Every structure is written in C-alpha cells, then in structure tokens.
Amino acid sequence: MTVQNTPTMPALGLRLPRPLLIALIGLPGAGKTALAAYLEQRFQVRVVNRDAIRAALFPECAYTLPEKRAAFQALLLAIEVNAALGESTVIDGMTFSRRADLEKVAALGERYGLTLAPIWLDIDPELAKQRITKDWETGRSMPLDRVPELVDSVLERFERPAPTVPVIDAAQTPEKVAHLAERIVAQRAGLRLP
C-alpha cells in the first residue's frame, strides 16, 4: 500500500484587519459547521469546535453535562491561546442555546481585545431535523448525540439571541448563507469587500 503525503494547503483567504471572535448560534442542523469551514478558508480564522474537544477529552463520551462543561472550559482556553497569538476564532460545535454561554465568550473576547461577531443561523426545527436525518443516512461523521430529537431538546432551552445579533435564514442555500455571513464578518472586522 502506498501512502501519499498530501500537504495541508495554507488558507488562501483574506486576513482580517483586526481579530474577531465569531460565535455561530443555532439549532443542530442549522449549518454552523459548514459555515465555520467556509469562514476558516475565507478569512484565515481558526475553528474551535466544542464537539471535537469533547471527543478528544472523552473518547468514550456519554454526552453528559459535566463532559460538555469541561469541553466548554477547554474551548475558552483555546480562544485565549488564539487571542494571545493575534488570531481570530470561529466557534463551532455548540448551539449557544443559553445566552450565558455567549456572555462568557463575549467577556473573554473583550478581555483580549477581540471584536465579537455573533451570527444566528435561524432555521425551522423540522428542516433542522431533516438535515440531521440526511446526515445520518449519508454517513456524515458527527457526534453520536446529534439525532433529530436533539433539536427538540435544544429548542426547549433555547433563549433567543439579543435583537442586536445578526440573523441569517439558514433555510437558504449554503452559498447564500456563506455570502451573508461573509458580509457580517467583514463589517465587524472593518474589512471592505469588493
């Protein structure tokens, strides 16, 4: 068997003129992960994914609240490290269903001089469930607790973001969602796009 080394390509996107802390808010199935991947390439931001952190910390994860909170603390540390390096971060792998989590992230960002750029990917719960079902049917890699029923569970505790948080209708095409998010990020960073 021949193993080929495929070098990791450097991000070809734009460098933001000031570091941002991008918080993607929304139900499971809203498209946060796809948008995070797009923003990572478009703006050379670092993705910090709480689900990936949780999986690394707890390979036999039971998806309990203590495991989730430990992963959140590690996520905060990763944001701190990125900020110390002058890097922007996009947060993935969490819904920000509780405003308190966004407030903690915002306070950390403020302490490090990061500009907060929250974006709410608003989606009809039934469409979110359909997307999750499709992901399971196509074998897409995702956390084992990401099942259609999780949408209802998150919805029960979901606190609407503040009215100042930009909202994108996540039922639109991924390209349209990416374009709208790109504009929000650029505006928050003081970057003029063509």
Image (cartoon, rainbow, N blue to C red):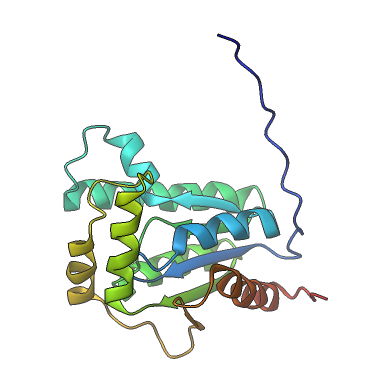
Extreme right residue here?
194
Q: Is residue 177 above or below residue 139?
A: below
Extreme bottom residue here?
163
Residue at the (25%, 51%) spot, across then down: 68
Q: Where's residue 78, x and y in %?
A: 48, 47
Q: Is residue 44 above or below residue 2?
A: below
Specify the quadrant that holds the C terminus. bottom right
Residue at the (38%, 46%) spot, across then down: 140
Q: Quadrant of residue 184?
A: bottom right
Q: Where's residue 148, x and y in %?
A: 22, 62
Q: Quadrant of residue 100?
A: bottom left
Q: Is residue 41 above or below residue 153?
A: above
Residue at the (39%, 70%) spot, across then down: 102
In terms of depth relative to the viewer, which is nearer, 155 or 1?
1
Extreme top residue here?
1
Q: Is residue 7 left or right of residue 132?
A: right
Q: Where's residue 7, x and y in %?
A: 69, 29
Q: Where's residue 121, x and y in %?
A: 44, 75
Counting the numbered discs, the total is 0
Residue at the (60%, 69%) spot, across then down: 175
Q: Is residue 193 left or right of residue 161?
A: right
Q: Is residue 8 left or right of residue 82?
A: right
Q: Is residue 112 left or right of residue 17?
A: left
Specify the quadrant that holds the N terminus. top right
In terms of depth relative to the viewer, which is nearer, 12 or 57?
12
